[in-house]
Amino acid sequence: MRHRRHRQQPLPPLSRTGRRVAWGADPPLALPTPLSLAISAALLPLLPLLPLLPLLPLLPLLLLAAGAASAQTSASVTLSSDYRWRGESLSDGRAAPQLVINYDSAAGWYAGAQLAGVRPRERDDAQLIAYAGLARRLASGWSWEAGASATAYRRDHAGDYQEGFVGLAGERFSARLYLAPRYLGRELRTAYIELNGFHPLQDGLKLIAHLGLLQPLSQGAGEQQRSNADLRLGVEATLGDASLQLAWLARTRKQQRPSSAAPSYAAPAYAAPTYAAPSYTNDPAPNALVLSLSYSF
């Protein structure tokens, strides 16, 4: 889930060339720019994900409740060389697009969704994460938040699950705690805590860091679960509304099933192997270098 990006209120209308024009003016036609062509190419892989859009009822409900006059709406599109969620590759180590839409009200309520192309078990699928919550600023300058999220897959709904979360954020640091009663749709309660931070350098550059820990709070049927940690270290360059990030990601290695244990062919397809951390994929690579290009609008 991406952090919300506060933007200014909408300005007067723009022409197709990006120049501001008066109402009724007839702007000249312009050829597509290299940037617009790149954005269009990144959006094309998201077209098969459009059937998931009806699963976003939270956004219009909150828009009506809070009123659009004082609202801030933002969106971003990202193309990553490998889409990783909590340390695991959900795109089978391949490039994948993500689309994020976020809404903030003046009262502190917010809602949004992330749509991503995934390939968890060598089969194309789509992941939708919808979230909503309330954020308030403290007198110290820090802010707290509380909310809930729902993760769903277009084809394999066996891995759908919901989480509640609370968080604390400062100028360069944030922390969140997620609690799931049925992680990955299984009889398994989990807690996930993440710490995020960045350090500005110069000329639009900054260092970024993320540390997460997934801790099972119960044991699945016939399985011995263990905790799983993930790490992200990288550098990000920002130029206007575009950003380029290069990051090294690592996670705890999955433990293999003991050789004396007989394989279980009755386990659901989405179940994690015995003695492994809760997982939705068969991703064997614990480390990866990921390049991401994002554009916000």
Image: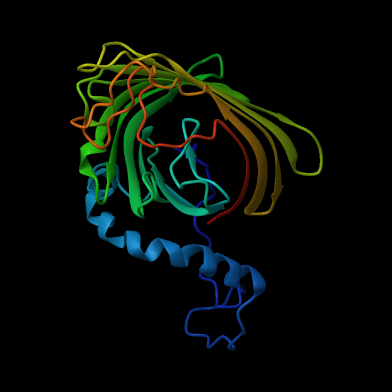
For the point 55% across and 65% down, the residue is 39
Q: Is residue 79 left or right of residue 156?
A: right
Q: Along the horizontal axis of the image, is 207 left or right of 216?
A: right
The residue drawn where x is 39% and y is 19% is: 259
Q: Where is 137 relative to 22, above or below?
A: above
Report the front residue among 259 and 148: 259
Residue 46 coordinates in the image, percent (x, y):
41, 61
Q: Along the line of sight, which residue is nearer the eye, 169 or 37? A: 37
Does any portion of residue 254 appear in the rendered image? Answer: yes
| Quadrant holding the N terminus | top left
What is the x, y in percent for residue 169? 52, 22
Query: Which residue is most to the right?
Result: 202
Q: Position of residue 280 (x, y in %)?
A: 35, 34
Would residue 3 be found to the left or right of residue 260 on screen? right
Observer able to see residue 171:
no
- For the image, the number of numbered tags is 0
Applied colour scheme: rainbow
**Residue at the spot x=52%, y=69% of the render?**
40
Counting from the top left corner in percent of width and height, residue 155 is at: 24, 51
Residue at 22% from the left image edge and 16% from the top image edge: 222
Question: Residue 158 lies in what quarter of the image?
Answer: top left
Whether 276 is drawn above or below 241: the answer is above
